[in-house]
Structures are given as C-alpha cells and as structure tokens.
Image (cartoon, coloured by chain):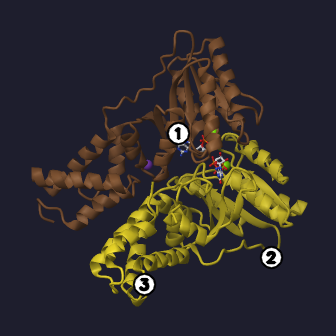
Amino acid sequence: MFTTLSDRLSETFKALRGKGRLSEADIDATAREIRLALLEADVALPVVKDFIAAVKERARGEEVSQALNPAQQVVKIVNEELVGILGGETRRLTFAKTPPTVIMLAGLQGSGKTTLAAKLALWLKDQGKSPLLVAADLQRPNAVNQLQVNGERAGVTVFAPQPGNGVGDPVAVSREGVAEARRTLHDVVIIDTAGRLGIDEELMRQAADIRDAVTPDEILFVVDAMIGQDAVNTAQAFLDGVGYDGVVLTKLDGDARGGAALSIAKMTGKPVMFASAGEKLTDFDLFHPDRMASRILDM
Amino acid sequence: LSRDRLDEDTWEDIEDTLITADVGVGPTQELVEKLRTRLRVEGSSAADARTVLREELLALVDPSMDRELHLDGPEDGPAVVLVVGVNGAGKTTSVGKIARVLVADGKSVVMGAADTFRAAATEQLTTWGERVGVEVVSGPEGSDPASVAFESVRAGVERGADVVLVDTAGRLQNKAGLMDELGKVKRVIEKQMPVREVLLVLDATTGQNGMVQARVFREVVDVTGIVLTKLDGSAKGGIVVAVQRELGVPVKLVGLGEGADDLAPFDPEAFVDALLGESPVD
Ligand SMILES: Nc1nc2c(ncn2[C@@H]2O[C@H](COP(=O)(O)OP(=O)(O)OP(=O)(O)O)[C@@H](O)[C@H]2O)c(=O)[nH]1
Ligand SMILES: Nc1nc2c(ncn2[C@@H]2O[C@H](COP(=O)(O)OP(=O)(O)OP(=O)(O)O)[C@@H](O)[C@H]2O)c(=O)[nH]1
Ligand SMILES: [K+]
Ligand SMILES: [Mg+2]
Ligand SMILES: [Mg+2]
C-alpha cells in the first residue's frame, strides 16, 4: 500500500534533523516525494508542477529552516497550500431573488448527475424548500424513469413530460420545467441533463442551449472522484462549453484519493461545493476542503 | 536538439505524455529508463526515439495476449458472461452492445438484469433488449440479484441460448458487503453452469484507482477480461497498461460511444498510438 507523504518526507529528512536550512538537494528530494504523492492521488500534472514550485519556494524560507522537525513543517506547508486551493470556506448555493431558483447539472456520462439531482432535492426539501426535478436527459435509456424513481424516494415532484429514450427536446422540457415550477409554486428547479463528453461539440451546444433557455442561478459540474489526469481537459471543456459556478464531487465513498478536486479547483477557480458519498439519497454533504486535503495526502 | 542525444526537456515531455495518459508514475519511469538504455546502447537518434518508445509501450501492452471472448459454452448449455464493475462505468451499455455483436453473429442471447438495486436499472437493460432484439430476464426491484442471475441462466438453458449475459449492479470495490454479494452471484450461477467470461468494465477516464478496482474485482470473481469504455472521450485509459501487466488480465473490448454499435475489439497498436498522440519526439 501507499506510504503516507508524511512517512516519506520523514525518511527523506532523516539525515538532516536539526541541521537548519535545507540545501537545494534536500528541497529537490522533498519535491520529488510530493510530486509522487500527488500524482498517485491523480492530481493533474500541470497542477502538480505549479504546486511543487509554490511549495519549493516556501521550503527555502525561514519557517522550515527554523523548524525543529523540517519534515513535519513541509507537510504542514503542503497541507496549507492544498486547503488554500481547495477553498478556505464552503460556498453556499445562491438563491434567486425571485423564485424559482434554477439549478442545472452537467457532467460526463455516469458521473452521478441523476443521483445527485435527487440528493440535492431531498437536502433542499429538508431545509424547507419545495424543489421540482426536471427530467431533461431524454437520451440515455430510461434516464427519465431513473429520475422518477429517485424523485419518488426523495418525496419530490418530478416534471417529466417526455418519455426520453431519444424522444423529446431537452431544451423545451427545461424551459417548460421552469414555467411549471412558477405555476405550481416550486421555489427551486433542478434540471437533470444527459451525460456528455467534453469533446462532443454537438451535445455541448445542447447544454449551452438549455442554459440559455433557463438562465440558471447555479450550474453545477458533477465529477466522479475516480477521474484521472483527464479531469483538467474535461473540466475546461465544460467551462468553455456551458460554464459552471460550482463543482460536485461524487463517489467519495470509494477509496480513490480524489486529486481531481485539486486539479479542477486550481485550473478553473470554481469552488467544490458538495460531496456525494454513496448511493443512498442521504449520502450527501457540503464539501470540506480540509478533509479533502488529508484524503489526497493519504493522512 | 542534437541528432543523437535527447535533451532533458524532451525526456520530460515524454514522461509528461505518459503521466497525463494515466499510465502511472511507476510504469512511466520504467518505460523511460528502458528507452534511455536502448537509445544509449543502440545509439539511436532523436528521430528514432518515438519509434522506440512506441515499441516499448506496445511490448508492455503485449499484443500477444489472448483477447478473444471465449463463448464456446458447455455441451448442455449456454456460455455465461458476467459483467462487473464500479458505479457508472458502462456495464449495462456494454452488455447491450455485446448482445448486438452476438446477435449479428447469428447467436441466440439472453440477458439477465441482475442489477436489482439501482433505480430503473432493469428498465434500462430492457430498453437495450428491445433495441438489439434480445430477451431480458428480470426480477422485482430489491430482489436477490443472485436469484435473478440464476433464473436468467435457467432461461438460457431452457431456450437453448448460446450465450447468457448477466448485468450486475455497480459497486465500489471497497464495499465488502457488496463485493461478497457479487461473489455469491457468481457462485449461484455456477451451481447451474460454469461462468465462461467475467468482464470487468473500466471507465477510460479512471485514474490510478483503476488498478485497485482491477485487483479487488479479480480477487472476488476472477476477472477474465476488461472492457475499456468511454474511449471516445479525451481520456486515454492508460491505467490498463499497469492493470494488464500486473494482473495479466487482457483488455478485450473497448467502448467508443453510447450507441449499440460503438464497441470494438481492443487493438493494442491503435491504443498505443492514441495514447502517445502527438508525442513530443516526432
Ligand atoms: N457509490 C456511489 N455511487 C454513486 C454515487 N453517486 C452516484 N452513484 C452511482 O453511480 C452510478 C451512476 O450514477 P447516475 O446518477 O446514474 O449518473 P449520471 O451522471 O446521471 O449518468 P448518465 O445520466 O448516464 O450520464 C449509479 O449506479 C449511481 O447509483 C456516490 O456518491 N457513491
Ligand atoms: N461516450 C460514451 N459513453 C458511454 C460508453 N459506455 C457507456 N456510456 C454511457 O455512460 C453512462 C453509464 O453507462 P451505464 O451502462 O449505465 O453504466 P453502468 O456501469 O451500468 O452503471 P451502473 O449500473 O449505474 O453502475 C451512460 O450514459 C452510457 O450511455 C462509451 O463507451 N462511451
Ligand atoms: K480517447
Ligand atoms: Mg443521468
Ligand atoms: Mg448498469
């Protein structure tokens, strides 16, 4: 199994306890260990490179040379830098001044959007909101049924005027969904959309068309915590193609280290807002940057 | 750049290409070491570096591996194929696509909807059944997946089917209870018929966790092949390089889209070329 970064650095520093300022060779050795740990956690390479440069800079300074235990001090710096990128504080959802608040979900195939739609609806319902789920994935086989079943489990109304499986226009359904919410006094609309690839221009345009039809208050990019180096390409493609305000990380109940959280936060500057961690509708929480930092470092 | 020596930037670019394709740090370093040695010994020029890298990567992916789907069933019944993997990897879709290929080959197929857990999973497979013209055996939501799997194999035997494809619920490999359940699904099927192929579905976007997935699923159900899905995206699926090497489990099929025909045999050369892409040493 993995040795923790902390162990690795202690090993690297064994020879130099109490020696004071780190030599360039020590700093390089440290950087190599950090690089390895981050890459094993699936942090994207360009992000790793920037990150290492920042940590190296700090490692040359007083805070390390003065430290009794330079290894622990470097780990502390790494942790601080991680938490810094992952976002100091959790950002809350923005609600519309005039309801309904429109939330649109977007992401790769199978990332967990439909499940998240129902989780989010349940969570908002528990806070006294009255959400309406809109079935705008009319492409993936039985996505509409899946949302209906999940909506029923959450005790939330599902607007599903089209059967899907290739039948119906997702842009029209989204637009009608917002009108329906207004008419029936639902104060939040959550739009489930089909999974799409970052490089699929046609489907990306469809997502942009949905966006333009409903002008969402929040677009959430839903991403699987198991994703590897491609996270940055995909996150950027969705940012360019449809744009988003926040990120949701799913399947955090697995044992993937989830370096994508760092990559996406760093590359896009968009905050990770929610953590989805299980198949039950209650397996849902606000995102905690400090926990994620520890997870990425395997500490 | 001199003709017979690569500078450090070029070496770094080579490493970066491999790392960003999810090949992993260990295998990347090994490959680069091999490449360095060969270029030193053989005195190759920069122009040859890409060729040598391609050769070494291809050797790791191992074109000599047996990548056939073995669907020659026992005398008295169908060949059973069990499809497993983590949540959302593309199992149900792959089952539908495989059925399409088999039907086109003139085989008679039954599909078993042994994902009784996820919302509308049975309906999803049923839609695939209609799409490719194959009967689907299912049970009520929340029922025992092993018994649905057993019933689907029995239906296959009764109808004289050539192949029974069993779809299972997505499960993360660190969930001991769900992995036990999967082991049981397989054992229950085997009371009736041997399981000919166990296909692990791996999403090409998966990073280093893919190795852990492969290791654990192999321990539990003895995986015989991998289906690498979503290779039509920008991800390269480099994790299968380490998976194949460490576990000896071959990638047999690749998923290239959401349509019924978007399935292809794994082609080591095409995979390696896509992975290297516009690699720096051209
Ligand atoms: N273990 C676990 N499974 C999850 C989580 N979120 C979603 N899933 C599962 O992941 C699979 C895919 O989830 P969906 O909600 O269907 O994903 P999607 O993004 O809507 O998929 P498409 O509509 O096909 O693009 C399902 O099996 C879900 O039950 C999670 O946080 N943890
Ligand atoms: N682009 C692309 N999408 C795919 C491919 N294979 C599957 N998908 C899509 O990925 C999503 C998940 O596929 P499923 O077949 O439902 O995955 P699963 O493993 O059965 O999911 P669970 O049963 O929920 O664990 C769906 O939207 C599929 O259409 C592929 O090769 N390429
Ligand atoms: K690809
Ligand atoms: Mg969905
Ligand atoms: Mg499925």
Residue B217, numbered circle: 1
Q: Mark 2 belongs to which amino acid?
A: Lys
Q: Distance of mark 2 from mark 3, alpha carbons?
A: 53 Å
Q: Distance of mark 1 from mark 3, alpha carbons?
A: 45 Å
Q: Quadrant of residue A35?
A: bottom left
Q: Is residue B202 above or below residue A298?
A: above
**Which residue position holds label 3?**
A68
Residue, x 32% and y 78% (percent of image)? Answer: A16
Q: Distance of mark 1 from mark 2, alpha carbons?
A: 49 Å
Q: Position of residue A147 (x, y in %)?
A: 75, 48
Q: Is mark 2 within 8 Å of ligand 1?
A: no
Residue, x 50% and y 72% (percent of image)? Answer: A266
Q: Is residue B234 left or right of residue A205?
A: left
Q: Colour of chain B?
A: brown
| Nearer the observer, B95 or A4 | A4
Q: Is residue A95 left or right of residue B89?
A: right
Residue neighbourhood size for the residue with mark 2, other residues' Cα within 10 Å, grouped as few (<14), some (14–19), many (≥20): few
Labels 1 and 3 touching (C-beta < 8 A): no
Q: Position of residue A259 (x, y in %)?
A: 50, 63
